[in-house]
Amino acid sequence: MAVKVILPTPLRPYAEHKASVEFDAATVGDALDRLTAQYGDLKKHLYTPEGRIRSFVNVYLNDEDIRFLKQEQTPTKSGDTITIVPSIAGGD
Amino acid sequence: MPIDTSALPRQDVKLSKEEILRYSRHLIMPEVGMDGQLKLKKAQVLLIGAGGLGAPLGLYLAAAGVGRLGIVDFDVVDFTNLQRQITFSTKDVGRKKAEAARDRLSAMNPDIQIDTFDTMLTSANALDLFKDFDIIVDGTDNFPTRYLVNDACILLGKPNVYGSIFRFEGQVTVFGAPSGPCYRCLYPEPPPPGLVPSCAEGGVLGVLPGIVGSLQAMETIKLILGAGESLAGRLLLFDALAMRFRELKVRKNPACPICGENRTINKLIDYEEFCGIRGEEAPVVTTGIPEITPRELKARLDRGDDLFILDVREPHEYQICNLNGHLIPLGDLPKRVSELDSSREIVAHCRSGKRSADAVEFLQKAGFKKILNLKGGILAWSDEVDPSVPKY
């Protein structure tokens, strides 16, 4: 199942400046694993050393936060979009 | 979710003939009309921050006739602000932002009341400051203040029109709407300090806060009028380079410590500590990081000392100005550390001394013993040694 992972600006430098990447994945967790396998530098920005998604990074499957679905076990289907949305604070 | 401005202890508010003419383009719309314009006139909106977001916010809310605007900002207009903070002119550089903004807004609309609060927003003053306003608009630029604004709004039951930006992306939503989510529902915890750069470090497209701040002004006006659908429960994401808007759902977290079913936060806390900043070493150079000042460096170079200058900035910064250093951007340092000779004395520098302090710390851990951080970076070099080096 081809899913698109959309990367936020702060993380693009760690993924060859790509705005999005596509993977075949069965779950959100699967897609994120493939993402961090391909771009190792992303791992520490997305995950704690214990392997949990960092609390200031939200992951959405289409328009729903995965915290309200099945977390990383949320199943994906072809054409789905996973969006990573970190907390940003700029305003000045 | 309309704001019940009729419940406010304001005097019987009317529009003068001049105001009717001024706002005629509002009045002829059924969605606004006299009722709507009177709601605007009775409304009291507090702007936290008079910078990139605060500028379009202030301008559009003043133009729309919001009866009372409060501006909270303790900062001073800086030359680098003019690239995006459109309430200010070149002649305002050096002035207090809140005052300069007030002058600009009242020149546009002398009929509204503008109150300035030349103070840092803190846990000690936030509740008092917020209580007399109907809507709070978050135009701040740091995590501790955002959590403070959120918590104060939730504790007081006031909506918080939120906007934030980074480089060329923006986020807008409304927190604190009745039965709506709050900032903690979306992001229970902030990132550790240093992980997400500020505008000074990351840069920003000047017009981006103009767009995001205008969206915040739009949401504020809609809340006052009770018109349309607010962004409460929706996070609007804007990617300026792709010119794409996307919308994500924001759900209220039933376990939220401040707006959830079992509130555990009943008063404002120490937000710097919450964000991990208190207890962090000073942002620029820290104890344990060996330093050299620009004057000392110049003296040693003139003497002929064999120093290796390591520049940890980005290539586009090197093009602006450089000290002929060997360029390895900080992010690449782990991969390219083999380019450095640990038997040589290395002086690391960046723009202001922060990134190079990180570089020195990294290299020390990697076993480098002869490593110094240039205190104040190339900015200090320009100030103290060679003013022909441009500052940026």
Image (tube, rainbow, N blue to C red):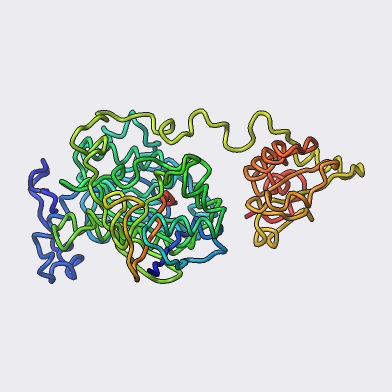
Name the residue rendered at 27%, 61% in the picture: B63
Q: Residue furthest right?
A: B304
* Label tally: 0
Q: Is B116 displayed left or right of B308 in the figure? A: left
Kindly tell me whether residue B44 is visible in this rendering.
no
Residue A68 location (% of width, % of height):
26, 50
Q: Is B34 displayed left or right of B293 in the figure? A: left
The residue closer to the viewer here, B256 or B217, is B256
Answer with the quarter of the image where residue B322 lies.
bottom right
Kindly tell me whether residue B369 is visible in this rendering.
yes
Residue B88 location (% of width, % of height):
44, 56
Residue B389 location (% of width, % of height):
73, 55
Q: Is residue A68 above or below residue B318?
A: above
Residue A57 location (% of width, % of height):
41, 49
Answer with the quarter of the image where residue B134 lies.
top left
Q: Is residue B329 above or below residue B356?
A: below
The residue closer to the viewer here, A33 or B301, is A33
The residue closer to the viewer here, B13 or B82, is B82
Q: Quadrant of the C terminus of chain B?
A: bottom right
The residue closer to the viewer here, B296 or B349, is B349
Q: Is residue A35 above or below residue B240?
A: above
